[in-house]
């Protein structure tokens, strides 16, 4: 499972990168080229977001992307076909990212089955609290899928423990209050927060929300195991296409080494 | 006072807090967990504190004309052959039942020591009510409103701004109430340390459905007592319109223990249920159980759980979901769900205003329309009670449009010309 893969990778590299695609935006073809860039640039994990009409945890850039993908008619079968194709072609482990209604409407068993068949490694569900996730998590983990749980700076220590209980793969630490997109100030508060998270789990720790620049990546080195870059990647694509996207990913990866 | 079943709503099985049968819950991004936990604690303490409810009653009786009267409709009763009573929520401060919930939450905000309130609004009634509360209680206030609703309800936007609120126009999604809720949740996810989200109806994550039901139960508690003391009998049926379901939950809750009282919830039938252009989550076959906006209920969604556009002549009923407590009461057979179409509503609006001199909100008129439709089933002596949730002044543009009032159009043209 992911835990092993990540620990192995972390033997060689001190900070890994996880990136993000809203599947179907700007197009499946563009998503494919994004994945090719990620692989070339040395990305270690990628979230494939299944678009949802009510993405309450997302900021404006991803809200727009979710809507546009749905408007262009993205359906489950295209999402899973894309995932399956990507899993065959690329070496980067793929994660489902989305909202609980998709899982609920698909049915938990069907959801896990489809993830397995498509070659995904696990899932991140933005609006499923750990106490409601127990059944899904148990079922998924028995099938070798990781359930990634989110910790936040507002969580009490007791809550962090609850979140850690059924988590697997790694922990997704939300860097700040708010939704995806806007910039995060990385300060001393963050390292205290990461220490609190580490105190309740042995799993690798990832930090996301508002990580935007190579400088951010440099600051995170030594604090977390994985840096998550979502909105900033999509913005690079929107501003400068594939060339800018590739350049941006390479600059991030460079910062993990320097 | 008979309130056994209302109190029972507060009793959850272990590990099932916030669920009413399979409906409800708190499906929220983790970042909101602690804020929701704080709110739940403060709400539970207030619920157990009789002094809190008394302070709420006192505030509402001096600031919002409570108890609102019930009016007997002698002309309509004669016309339709049944005894028709209206619970006059339209006589509230700001013209709708929305103020009940808002002032109650305002008192909780004071207890929590927060300085800013945010809210979504559809018709604009809840936004105006929240802005009013913020002005009175001294909070900063931001209101999220879908762009389409801003177009339908400009007068309410004007008043919110006069009341000192910032109105943010939401361009996402269908540009209506559901999108305003998403935007308010996103604001809250960043601002919760000093901000309270005043959700306007009995939807969203726990504790909102229960909390808003509790504040709105003031309607039903008054109405039951008024029927007994002023009319001498309980009604045979009660009608209320359902957007999210707060005015319906409020009046129904007074009568849950009275098994002889039939509770009828009226959804927006829009252009007709067959047209699929409506907002009937339970009365139509177009909805499925799903999870969105923090809670589980019937949503107007497709097979893959994507929310579909809804339609209603009334912005306040134009919403994808329905309160989880009402969904549960429907499942238990305690509440019957029906729908009234846009056209039926316009007809009922004219009947009510001409015969009783009451300008009702289009939302509330759905309940009137359904009651009039069902009148032939009832006897001359049967009593029915309709919750008139709000007044219709805000709907002047929509109604004049629907009635194709030429003089109004000319007035608008002249106004526009002189700008
Ligand atoms: C007058 C009036 N009635 C009813 C509603 C619908 O809301 P609810 O179902 O929560 O009562 C609204 C919503 O804006 C309203 O303004």
Image (cartoon, coloured by chain):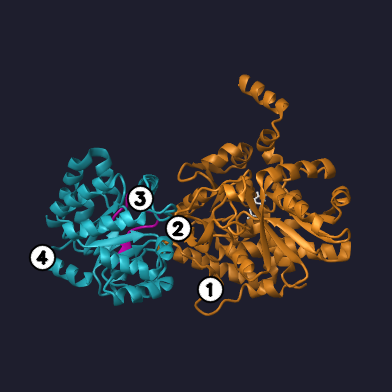
Chain colours: A cyan, B orange
The part of the chain drawn in magenta is A171-186
Instruction: Using residue B199 as the reference point, say whether residue A227 is left or right of it.
Output: left
Q: Distance between the residues labelled 2 and 1?
A: 28 Å
- Which one is earlier in the sequence, the residue at label 2 or at label 1? 1
Q: Which chain carries label 3?
A: A
Asked if badges 1 and 3 are on one and the same chain, I answer: no
Tell me residue A116's x, y (percent): 27, 68
Q: How crowded is mark 4: few (under 14 residues within 10 Å), some or many (20 or more)?
A: few
User: What secondary structure characterizes most of the magenta part?
Assistant: loop
The correct choice, above or below, for A199 with respect to B172 in the image is below
**Residue highlighted by disc 4:** A12
Q: Is mark 2 within 8 Å of ligand 1?
A: no
Q: Is mark 1 on a helix, strand or loop?
A: loop
Asked if badges 4 and 3 are on one and the same chain, I answer: yes
**Residue highlighted by disc 1:** B17
Q: Is mark 3 on a helix, strand or loop?
A: loop
Tell me residue B80's x, y (percent): 84, 51
Instruction: Using residue A191 as the reference point, say whether residue B182 is left or right of it.
Output: right
The correct choice, above or below, for B148 with respect to B178 in the image is above
Instruction: Name the one closer to the observer, B129 or A106.
Output: A106
Q: How far apart are marks 4 and 1 (CA)?
A: 46 Å
**Residue highlighted by disc 3:** A74
Instruction: Name the one closer to the observer, B376 or A65.
Output: B376
The answer to the question of whether label 4 and label 3 lie on touching residues, with beta carbons closer than 8 A, is no
**Residue highlighted by disc 2:** B303
Q: How far apart are marks 3 and 2 (CA)?
A: 13 Å
The correct choice, above or below, for B26 with respect to B82 in the image is below
Residue drawn where x is 23% and y is 49% of the image: A213
- Quarter of the image with the N terminus of chain A is bottom left
Q: How crowded is mark 2: few (under 14 residues within 10 Å), some or many (20 or more)?
A: few
Tell me residue B5's x, y (percent): 68, 73
Q: Distance between the residues labelled 1 and 3?
A: 36 Å
């Amino acid at each position: 499972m992911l835990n092993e893969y990540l620990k192995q990778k972390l033997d060689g590299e001190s900070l890994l990168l996880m990136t993000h695609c809203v599947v179907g935006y700007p197009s499946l073809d563009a998503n494919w080229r994004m994945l090719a860039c990620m692989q070339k640039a040395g990305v270690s994990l990628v979230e494939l977001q299944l678009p949802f009409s009510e993405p309450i945890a997302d900021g404006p850039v991803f809200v727009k992307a979710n809507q546009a993908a749905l408007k262009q008619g993205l359906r489950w079968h295209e999402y899973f076909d894309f995932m399956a194709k990507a899993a065959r072609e690329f070496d980067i482990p793929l994660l489902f990212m989305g909202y609980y209604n998709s899982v609920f409407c698909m049915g938990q068993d069907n959801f896990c089955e489809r993830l397995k068949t498509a070659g995904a490694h696990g899932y991140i569900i933005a609006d499923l609290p750990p106490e409601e996730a127990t059944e899904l998590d148990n079922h998924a983990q028995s099938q070798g899928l990781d359930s990634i749980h989110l910790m936040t700076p507002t969580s009490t220590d007791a809550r962090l423990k609850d979140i850690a209980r059924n988590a697997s793969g790694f922990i997704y630490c939300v860097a700040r209050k708010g939704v995806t997109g806007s910039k995060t100030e990385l300060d001393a508060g963050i390292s205290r927060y990461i220490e609190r998270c580490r105190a309740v789990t042995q799993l690798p720790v990832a930090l996301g929300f508002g990580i935007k620049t190579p400088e951010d990546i440099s600051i995170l080195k030594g604090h977390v195991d994985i840096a998550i870059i979502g909105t900033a990647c999509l913005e690079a694509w929107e501003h400068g296409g594939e060339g800018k996207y590739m350049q941006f990913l390479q600059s991030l990866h460079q910062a993990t080494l320097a | 006072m008979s309130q056994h079943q209302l109190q029972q709503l507060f009793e959850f099985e272990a590990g099932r807090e916030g669920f009413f049968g399979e409906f409800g819950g708190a499906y929220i991004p983790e970042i909101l967990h602690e804020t929701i936990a704080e709110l739940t604690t403060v709400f539970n303490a207030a619920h157990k504190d009789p002094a809190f409810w008394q302070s709420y009653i006192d505030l509402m009786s001096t600031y919002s004309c409570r108890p609102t009267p019930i009016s007997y409709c002698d002309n309509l009763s004669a016309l339709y052959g049944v005894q028709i009573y209206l619970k006059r929520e339209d006589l509230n401060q700001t013209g709708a039942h929305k103020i009940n919930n808002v002032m109650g939450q305002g008192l909780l905000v004071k207890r929590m020591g927060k300085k800013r309130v945010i809210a979504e609004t559809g018709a604009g009634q809840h936004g105006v009510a929240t802005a009013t509360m913020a002005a009175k209680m001294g909070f900063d206030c931001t209101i999220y409103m879908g762009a389409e609703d801003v177009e339908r309800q400009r007068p309410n936007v004007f008043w919110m701004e006069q009341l000192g609120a910032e109105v943010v126009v939401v361009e996402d999604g269908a540009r209506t109430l559901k999108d305003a809720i998403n935007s308010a949740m996103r604001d809250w996810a960043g601002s919760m340390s000093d901000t309270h989200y005043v959700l306007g109806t009995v939807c969203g994550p726990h504790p909102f459905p229960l909390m808003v039901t509790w504040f709105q139960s003031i309607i039903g508690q008054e109405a039951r007592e008024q029927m007994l003391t002023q009319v001498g009998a309980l009604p045979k049926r009660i009608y209320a319109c359902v957007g999210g379901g707060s005015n319906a939950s409020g009046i129904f809750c007074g009568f849950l223990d009275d098994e002889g009282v039939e509770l009828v919830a009226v959804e927006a039938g829009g252009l007709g249920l067959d047209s699929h252009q409506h907002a009937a989550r339970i009365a139509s076959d177009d909805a499925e159980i799903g999870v969105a906006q923090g809670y589980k209920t019937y949503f107007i969604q497709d097979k893959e759980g994507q929310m579909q556009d809804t339609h209603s002549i009334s912005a306040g009923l134009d919403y994808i979901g329905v309160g989880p407590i009402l969904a549960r009461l429907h499942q238990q057979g305690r509440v019957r769900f029906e729908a009234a179409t846009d056209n039926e509503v316009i007809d009922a609006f004219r009947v009510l205003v001409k015969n009783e001199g009451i300008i009702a909100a289009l939302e509330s008129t759905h309940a009137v329309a359904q009651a009039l439709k069902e009148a032939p089933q009832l006897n001359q002596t049967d009593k029915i009670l309709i919750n008139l949730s709000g007044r219709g002044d805000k709907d002047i543009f929509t109604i004049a449009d629907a009635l194709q009032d030429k003089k109004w159009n000319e007035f608008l043209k002249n106004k526009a010309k002189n700008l």
